[in-house]
Every structure is written in structure tokens, then in C-alpha cells.
Image (cartoon, helix red, strand yellow):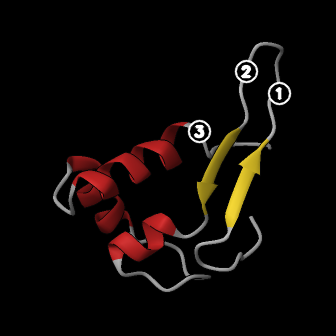
């Protein structure tokens, strides 16, 4: 994935009929974990975000990254 500007809106187009487009702000999980853009988020911080230790918003962002932002786009 290319490095995007923090907070830039990103839209994923549907890949199958009946799906809706998904719009989100780039770099949200980086901001929530305190990791600079362009650097990989450490596994411990990802796990903490998924567990909800960094707040509800970080948990939702980590879950989104885990389930939606995987593989080819």
C-alpha cells in the first residue's frame, strides 16, 4: 500500500454486485497507536488495539484493518 496523507479520505469500490462503497480516513490506526505514517505498526500495538486497550475507536480501526484492508484491492 502506498503511503497516503494522514486523514485523506479513501474510497474502496465494490468488487461484487450488491456491495456498497467503503469510505474511511487514511492513517486512523496509525494516529490511534502513535505510529508515524509510512512505518509499520508493531504487532504489540495492533494486538493492544484489537483488544480494546487503546480505546473503542482504535479497536474498531484495528478490526477494520484486519478484516477489510487485506489482500488485493
Locate the C terminus by quadrant: top right
Q: Which residue is mark 3?
A: 68
Eyeballing the image, is 69 above or below 32?
A: above
Counting residues from the start of the chain, the first of labels 3 and 2 encountered is 2
Pair 3/2: label in front? 2
Are the residues flagged by discs 1 and 3 in contact, CB closer than 8 Å?
no
Residue 34, quarter of the rendered image: bottom left
Residue at horizontal 71 percent and vertical 57 percent from the top: 10
Mark 1 closeness class: few <14, some 14–19, many ≥20 residues within 10 Å = few
Q: Quadrant of the N terminus?
A: bottom right
Q: Position of residue 23 (x, y in %)?
A: 65, 47
Q: Is residue 58 left or right of residue 27?
A: left
Element carrying mark 3? loop
Give residue 68's quadrant in the image: top right
Query: Is 5 located above or below residue 20 in the figure?
Result: below
Farthest residue, direction bottom: 36
Label 2 to label 1, Cα distance in Å? 7 Å
Point out residue 30 in the picture as x, y percentages from the top left corner. Answer: 46, 73
Give the Cα distance between marks 3 and 2: 13 Å
Q: CA distance from mark 1 to mark 3?
A: 12 Å
The residue that label 1 is drawn on is 15
Residue contact between numbered discs 2 and 1, judged by CB atoms under 8 Å: yes
Query: Where's residue 59, x and y in %?
Result: 30, 50
- Residue matched to label 2: 19
Q: Residue at x 68, y 62 (%)?
A: 9
Tell me which label, 1 or 3, sits earlier in the chain.
Answer: 1
Dot 1: element: loop
Amino acid at each position: 500500500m502506498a503511503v497516503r496523507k494522514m486523514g485523506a479520505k479513501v474510497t474502496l469500490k465494490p468488487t461484487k454486485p450488491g456491495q456498497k462503497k467503503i469510505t474511511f480516513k487514511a492513517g486512523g490506526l496509525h494516529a490511534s497507536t502513535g505510529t508515524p505514517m509510512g512505518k509499520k505498526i508493531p504487532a504489540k500495538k495492533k494486538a493492544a488495539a484489537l483488544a480494546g486497550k487503546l480505546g473503542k475507536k482504535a479497536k474498531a480501526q484495528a478490526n477494520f484493518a484486519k478484516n477489510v484492508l487485506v489482500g488485493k484491492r
